[in-house]
Image (tube, rainbow, N blue to C red):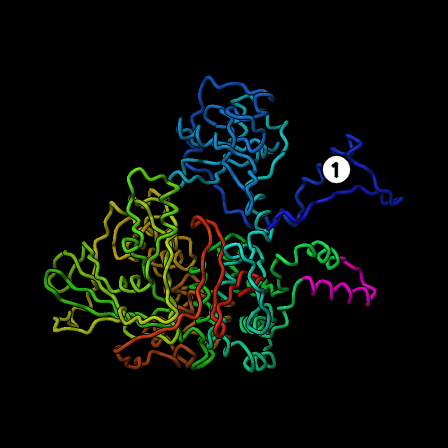
């Protein structure tokens, strides 16, 4: 497959006489033309900026010690790598001035080396000097790509050097004379993501058959949005989402909605469901462009010519290339649903599981006032029973928790062939062996019920600080079981996170009663009088210090240890890297640590009006907002989760009163066989947890279908 199908051709034309000029024949014209060609468009600059994460100085930048007898580098000494002949992709060591080429980097899908023999990396390994700057990205205003090899446990990270001009001046480099000649890391990433070569629907060298029709509509990539597209494809394949947002429900809402569509949750969800299941957007993209241009010509509108170009360019490759759908581009949906979220609002790649959790929570919030049976996430809710048992007095306590997914861990020790290190084995061979290893999903399910020992527990019954045995199991199974299988491992208690590449063997039909909560035995329960004393686990301050050394706040670190059942700094660090920047988590930690605002405090009237328009009473709105620092979303959650306090403030009904706090229906413990049929899954493709691509696989009838953004194939 030839991935380099397209070639960029540039011409210089005179607008006055329409003459075409050979710009390469005139040195001055050639120089001007090349500057224009190399310049990034304003659109790409905005997209590039939105994809950039916040880059800040690291400790190695702030404590940089440059060698005293530094060489004064002339232009000729910066012409090529000091250890080979390469003249591009050069990185200057900010400690000693060594100039080395970057990492070996191959163009995706080809054997073309884009430049790099890793001599800058090898210099770092030999000397320990952490910081390098890419010389081709240095600009007169002091901007450049600066990379720290020592950050992220040796994996490296983008950093900012606020004193870059002075640090370069130490080597006699005057940045006022410098101009950018090479693409930055962000621009290279943008370029790769905008190319469709990464999203080819080839499996093992075979072009997959493209599919079309209702329920087979692709979702266009609107900027590293594959995580969102994959999750939405899976959710809208479930009966509950289809019935809630499709068909008659969509028509009824459209007839009665008075909100601007861009601000209405239901309008956007109905629009998305219609787009996915109407079948109109599964037309081949090139055919659509051709139809659009013909229509434009018939209407005396400007002809873009895209269809003819696409037809000519793709004619020779038609036999070997899969088709790309017109698809849907849910930009308005993303703007509404992800508005205000630190991670999902931008265009950086994100975690699909985190988006699933976020989206499900948003759906539940927006469906609370719609009446019984409206919430499309209800069929996902499993009741998980948690059991703790004191190892000193054997007293037990049970707690039932409702979850929209369960998480199972991959037991790497059960992989076949085994993953144990082989003496004399190279790193490449070990990686290849891991990719060829397989773990049975049933082994993952069995791990769910295994007990774990937690130290530092203050037992309310025997009043001793001891350890507990913690165990969980599914008390009541949902109609649709969502399972999260983390594919990463944290090495040590620091930031080094590795992706797990072993394969999972998941049968189409699987029996999962190995996850069922065990029956209660003849056990001594912690009595009612003990419930007033919450089981407490002493926070290990040594673990807190290890976590704060990673840059997290003290209160956040204590919360992470609690959320991981005080299982150690390693588990807490993994939780922090997954959830530490989640706005909901940050808000909760802030609420825990900050003194509670009094209910009678000053609350803005416009916020009270916003909640009363949703059906809450004035008293409920004031109380909820005062308890959550006037955050509407958190206030709604608080009102529903604190029925006793709300009941005291309730003076006129409202949804909180209407739904309160009635006794939950008694659920029966699951017994007998529990059998599920695999309906779909989301797969992450990539070598590490920080990058890659998500695709979804769904069973449609008797066949499996791959949803790879706007490409839908068998």
Residue occupying the point 58% across, 58% down: 222
Left-right relation of 130 to 533:
right
Which secondary structure dominates the residues rendered in magenta? helix
Tell me if residue 644 comes above or below residue 443 in the rendering.
Answer: below
Q: Which residues lie in the magenta part?
A: 286-305
Whether the magenta-drawn stretch holds residue 290 is answered as yes
**Which residue carries the number 1 mark?**
33
User: Of 417 and 296, which appears nearest the observer?
Assistant: 417
Placement of 681 over or under 35, stated as above or below = below
Q: Is residue 232 above or below residue 172?
A: below
Q: Nearer the viewer, residue 535 or 185?
A: 185
Q: Nearer the viewer, residue 191 or 579?
A: 191
Q: Which type of secondary structure does the marked residue at label 1 adopt?
A: helix
Q: Position of residue 166 (x, y in %)?
A: 52, 27
- Please provide percent x and percent y for residue 709: 55, 61
Tally of numbered tags: 1
> Which quadrant of the structure image shows residue 181?
top right
Magenta includes 60? no
Task: Please provide percent x and percent y for residue 141.
Answer: 60, 34
Residue 336 image-quadrant placement: bottom right
């Amino acid at each position: 497959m030839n991935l380099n199908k397209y070639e960029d051709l540039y011409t210089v034309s005179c607008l006055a006489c329409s003459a075409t000029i050979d710009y390469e024949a005139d040195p001055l014209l050639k120089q001007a033309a090349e500057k224009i060609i190399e310049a990034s468009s304003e659109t790409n600059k905005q997209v590039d900026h939105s994809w950039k994460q916040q880059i800040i100085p690291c400790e190695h930048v702030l404590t940089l010690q440059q060698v005293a007898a530094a060489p004064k580098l002339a232009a000729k000494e910066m012409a090529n790598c000091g250890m080979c002949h390469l003249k591009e992709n050069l990185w200057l060591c900010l400690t000693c001035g060594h100039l080395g080429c970057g990492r070996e980097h191959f163009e995706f899908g080809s054997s073309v080396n884009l430049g790099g023999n890793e001599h800058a990396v090898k210099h770092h390994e030999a000397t320990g000097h952490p910081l390098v700057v890419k010389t081709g990205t240095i600009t007169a205003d002091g901007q450049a790509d600066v990379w720290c090899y020592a950050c992220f446990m040796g994996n490296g990270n983008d950093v900012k050097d606020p004193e870059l001009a002075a640090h370069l001046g130490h080597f006699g480099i005057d940045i006022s004379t410098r101009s950018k000649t090479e693409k930055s890391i962000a621009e290279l990433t943008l370029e790769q993501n905008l190319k469709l070569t990464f999203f080819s629907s080839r499996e093992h060298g075979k072009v997959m058959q493209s599919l079309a029709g209702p329920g087979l509509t692709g979702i266009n990539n609107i900027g590293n949005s594959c995580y969102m597209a994959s999750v939405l494809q899976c959710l809208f394949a479930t009966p509950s989402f289809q019935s809630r947002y499709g068909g008659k429900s969509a028509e009824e809402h459209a007839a009665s909605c008075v909100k601007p569509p861009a601000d209405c949750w239901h309008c956007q969800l109905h629009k998305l469901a219609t787009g996915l299941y109407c079948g109109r957007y599964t037309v081949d993209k090139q055919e659509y462009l051709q139809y659009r241009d013909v229509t434009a010509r018939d209407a005396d509108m400007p002809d873009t010519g895209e269809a003819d170009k696409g037809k000519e360019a793709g004619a020779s490759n038609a036999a070997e290339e899969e088709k790309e759908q017109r698809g849907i581009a849910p930009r308005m949906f993303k703007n509404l649903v992800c508005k205000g979220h630190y991670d999902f609002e931008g265009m950086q790649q994100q975690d699909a599981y985190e988006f699933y959790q976020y989206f499900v929570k948003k759906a539940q919030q927006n469906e609370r006032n719609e009446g019984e049976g409206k919430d499309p996430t209800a069929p996902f809710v499993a009741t998980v029973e948690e059991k703790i048992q004191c190892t000193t007095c054997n007293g037990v306590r049970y707690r039932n928790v409702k979850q929209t997914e369960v998480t199972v861990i991959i037991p790497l020790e059960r992989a076949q062939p085994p993953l144990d290190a082989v003496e004399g084995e190279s790193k490449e061979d070990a990686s290849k062996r891991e990719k060829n290893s397989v773990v049975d999903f049933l082994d993952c399910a069995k791990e769910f019920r295994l007990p774990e020992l937690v130290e530092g527990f203050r037992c309310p019954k025997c009043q001793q600080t001891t350890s507990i045995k913690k165990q969980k199991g599914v008390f009541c199974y949902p109609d649709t079981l969502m399972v999260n299988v983390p594919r990463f491992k944290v090495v040590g208690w620091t930031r080094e996170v590795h992706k797990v590449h072993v394969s999972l063997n998941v049968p189409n039909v699987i029996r999962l009663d190995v996850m069922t909560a065990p029956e209660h035995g003849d056990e001594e329960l912690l009595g009612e009088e003990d419930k007033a004393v919450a089981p407490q686990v002493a926070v290990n301050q040594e673990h807190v210090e290890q976590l704060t050394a990673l840059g997290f706040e003290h209160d956040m670190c204590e919360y992470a240890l609690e959320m991981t059942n005080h299982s150690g700094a390693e588990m807490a660090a993994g939780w922090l890297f997954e959830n530490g920047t989640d706005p909901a988590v940050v808000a909760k930690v802030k609420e825990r640590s900050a003194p509670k605002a009094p209910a009678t405090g000053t609350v803005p009237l416009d916020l009270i009006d916003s909640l009363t328009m949703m059906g809450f009473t004035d008293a409920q709105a004031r109380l909820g907002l005062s308890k959550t620092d006037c955050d509407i979303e958190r206030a709604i959650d608080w009102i529903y989760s604190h029925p006793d306090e709300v009941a005291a403030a309730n003076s006129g009904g409202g949804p909180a009163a209407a739904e309160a706090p009635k006794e939950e229906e008694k659920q029966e413990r699951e017994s007998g066989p529990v059998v599920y049929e695999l309906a779909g899954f989301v797969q992450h493709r990539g070598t590490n947890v920080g990058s890659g691509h998500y695709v979804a696989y769904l069973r449609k009838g008797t066949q499996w279908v791959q949803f790879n953004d706007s490409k839908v194939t068998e």
